[in-house]
Image (cartoon, helix red, strand yellow):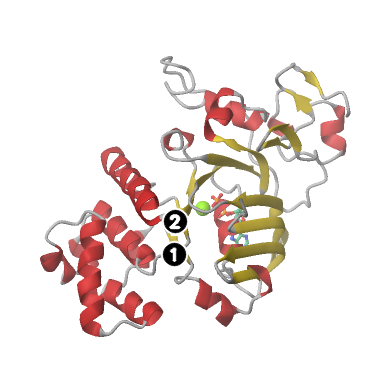
């Protein structure tokens, strides 16, 4: 199957007064039509910057983005990174939608929720006001907001956190995007609401056939949601695998550490939190060796000398690590 999005050698740097920040380093991944790809990694690992880079949403003056991001769908085959801001604007919303963690800040406080959904339909799909309203009511219903007629005229502050996130999702899916990117959309919500939003995302993905990139720092929510998982560390993609394979057979020490840090799921009932010692890498240095080496319990000499290549472990399972975790020894080819 041809990927709907193929990202190759994505690099993003920020030029700051303190020096260059190497936020995203040589990221490669593919997204296939209709799948859910989870992107996990601790705060500051470059998850948001990766997505914002693809959509041209970083401050142009201080950021440098390079690489390719091929978006392919019916009749379209285009490198998103070669487009101008205004061209990218046409893809954003129409083909690729984004939802953020902070729904309150993303929604306009002085416009009713219903009007904001209508507005999106009028702008992107050219609906007239009446048709847009009718469709907005359907969308409110679709995302599980009861009494849509009444809620249409409510302002964002009148909504609970979970309802605001549902409204954001309604706006994001209003134009039937092929790709929905959700950047930690449930982080600010309590656990019950979080699982309701996850359930909603799964249902919509099935019903609308979208491909979804679900960003989270919480591997615990990934198991029941994703088809595949991309693990990020220090601005690099350290491991990518089908979800079951990743849980059963993690092959990067960072993933292993993350899984150890999940209470009850990875430890099969043993409720124990293992934190990974040390702090994240200094992103002011261009990577010259493995980004995890400072914290890695398996590090040996080559890990300090070179950046590991992406080793294929199994079909669709790659790990950027010189150490063979399965056989508990350095890779023979290193
Ligand atoms: N505008 C910016 N200028 C400089 N550095 C930035 C900017 N935006 C993000 N960064 C840095 O890029 C790194 C990755 O950030 P981010 O992608 O937001 O992490 P995550 O989403 O995984 O928590 C962080 O070290 C962050 O400080
Ligand atoms: Mg982020």
Q: Position of residue 322 (x, y in %)?
A: 79, 30
Q: Residue at x 43, y 23 (%)?
A: 263
Q: Position of residue 153 (x, y in %)?
A: 15, 72
Q: Position of residue 75 (x, y in %)?
A: 58, 71
Q: Which residue is mark 1?
A: 177
Where is 54 relative to 291, above or below? below
Q: Quadrant of residue 331?
A: top right
Q: For this view, does 223 lie left or right of residue 302?
A: left
Regarding mark 2 in the picture, which secondary structure is present there?
loop
Question: Where, by quadrant of the figure, is residue 131 drawn?
Answer: bottom left
Tell me, for residue 97, which label it has, or none.
none
Can see residue 247? Answer: yes
Q: Image check: 296 left or right of 261? A: right
Residue toward you, 218 or 94: 94
Q: Residue 210 has which mark? A: 2
From the viewer's perspective, is residue 35 above or below residue 320? below
Cα separation between marks 2 and 1: 7 Å
């Amino acid at each position: 199957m041809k990927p709907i999005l193929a990202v190759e050698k994505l690099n993003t740097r920020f030029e700051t007064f303190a020096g260059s920040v190497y936020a995203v380093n040589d990221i490669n991944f593919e997204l296939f039509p209709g799948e859910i790809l989870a992107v996990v990694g601790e705060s500051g690992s470059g998850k948001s910057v990766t997505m914002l880079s693809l959509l041209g949403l970083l401050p142009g003056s201080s950021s440098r983005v390079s690489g390719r991001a091929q978006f392919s769908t019916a009749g379209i085959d285009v490198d998103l990174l070669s487009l101008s801001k205004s061209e990218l604007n046409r893809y954003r919303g129409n083909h690729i939608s984004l939802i953020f963690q902070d729904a309150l800040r993303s929604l306009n406080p002085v416009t009713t929720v219903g009007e904001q959904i209508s507005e999106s339909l009028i702008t992107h799909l050219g609906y007239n006001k009446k048709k847009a309203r009718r469709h907005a009511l359907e969308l409110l219903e679709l995302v599980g907001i009861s009494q849509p007629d009444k809620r249409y005229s409510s302002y964002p502050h009148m909504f609970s956190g979970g309802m605001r996130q549902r409204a954001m999702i309604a706006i994001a899916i209003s134009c039937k995007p092929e790709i929905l990117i959700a950047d930690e959309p449930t982080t600010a919500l309590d656990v019950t609401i979080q699982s309701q939003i996850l359930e909603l995302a799964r249902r919509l993905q099935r019903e609308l056939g979208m491909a979804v990139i679900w960003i989270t720092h919480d591997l615990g929510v990934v198991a029941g949601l994703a088809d595949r998982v991309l693990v990020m560390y220090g601005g690099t993609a350290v491991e990518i695998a089908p979800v079951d394979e990743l849980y059963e057979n993690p092959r990067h020490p960072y993933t292993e550490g993350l899984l150890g840090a999940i209470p009850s799921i990875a430890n099969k009932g043993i409720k124990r939190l293992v934190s990974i010692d040390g702090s994240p890498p200094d992103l002011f240095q261009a990577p010259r060796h493995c980004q995890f080496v400072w914290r890695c319990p398996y590090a040996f000499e080559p890990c300090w000398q070179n950046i590991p290549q992406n080793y294929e472990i199994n079909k669709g399972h790659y790990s950027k690590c010189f150490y063979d975790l399965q056989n508990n020894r350095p890779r023979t080819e290193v």
